[in-house]
Amino acid sequence: MSEVAAMHAGAQANESPLTPESWGKLGMWLFLAGDAMSFGGLIVGYGILRHASTKWPVPAEVLGINLTALMTFVLIVSSVTMVLSLSAIQNGDRAKFNKFMGLTILGGLFFLGCQAYEWTHLLHDVLPKYNLAFSKDLFATTFFVLTGFHGMHVSGGVIYNICVFLAVNRGRYEAKPVEIAALYWHFVDLVWILIFTFVYLL
Amino acid sequence: MTEAAHKQPNYIGVFWWLLVLTIIEIAVIYLPIAKFAIAVMLIVLAVTKAALVALYFMHLTF
């Protein structure tokens, strides 16, 4: 509400009161809304297939929770470091921004590394034991499609964050682009929270 | 401009909540209760965590 009032006060005479405070931010929110629909479709499809199945393996037994719990923890921490890096650059503290943005990037890379290990372990050791395989049964296929689609988003996010990190240090960007990148990164974390719950825990 | 008008949320506080909720989620799946009850609890916990990230980290609250 205060944002709307301030926007109104600073608006030009011929500017619509609907003009957003930042076109970039609006654009990112619109993108995230569409992306949420993509993930939503995949998760609901997963739910329907699983509900219709009579012999769905117990995820906690096949997939193991320990590594994934660590991955969840690391991704949540990276969301915290991301928001702290934004806070730092909003206060003009470049060194602190570098530290926290660096940690966010490392968190993302750690998550991807863990996922690569988890996938390899599943493909070579675990799934054959249960006679499961990608594109042969629904459990494995939906698992890899869902976590793979998310993993691609994390990879994109890491590259995005590296680009923003470099651009800030070259003096080309200030707080707003970091804020927009942070929105994307939080979204990726949020989707993982849901995937972790529905695919691994339930 | 208006971002500084209201005070910054307690990011670390939100993090602790996210951590606690995650631990509770993992504990819930081992409870000896009906699967449906577990599912409901997990969904409530997951939605709460998602809301915390959206409201505080993505600055949706004023």
Image (spheres, coloured by chain):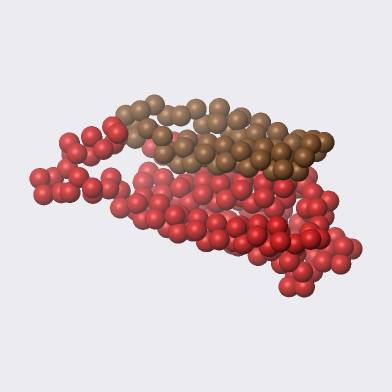
**Does residue A52 lie above or below A136 as drawn?**
above
What color is chain B drawn in? brown
State the image coordinates of residue A169 (x, y, percent, origin top left).
Answer: 43, 49
- Report which quarter residue A134 is drawn in: bottom right
- Which of B53 and B43 lies nearest the eye of the viewer? B43
Residue shown at 51%/46% (left/top)?
A186
Q: In the rendered view, does A23 fall on the left or right side of B36?
A: left
Q: In the rendered view, does B13 fall on the left or right side of A130?
A: left
**Does residue A48 lie above or below B60 as drawn?**
below
State the image coordinates of residue A63 (x, y, percent, origin top left).
Answer: 79, 54
Q: Quadrant of the N terminus of chain A?
A: top left
Specify whether residue A24 is in view: yes
Q: How many marks?
A: 0
Q: In the rendered view, does B10 fall on the left or right side of B35?
A: left
What color is chain A drawn in? red
State the image coordinates of residue B55 (x, y, percent, origin top left).
Answer: 46, 37
Residue at the bottom extreme of this rendering: A136
Specify whether residue A124 is in view: no
Residue shown at 45%/59% (left/top)?
A34
**Does residue A176 lie above or below A27 as drawn?**
above
**Does residue A117 lie above or below A171 as drawn?**
below
Residue shown at 40%/52% (left/top)?
A29
State the image coordinates of residue A21 (x, y, percent, origin top left).
Answer: 28, 45
Residue at the right extreme of this rendering: A129
Residue shown at 76%/35% (left/top)?
B27
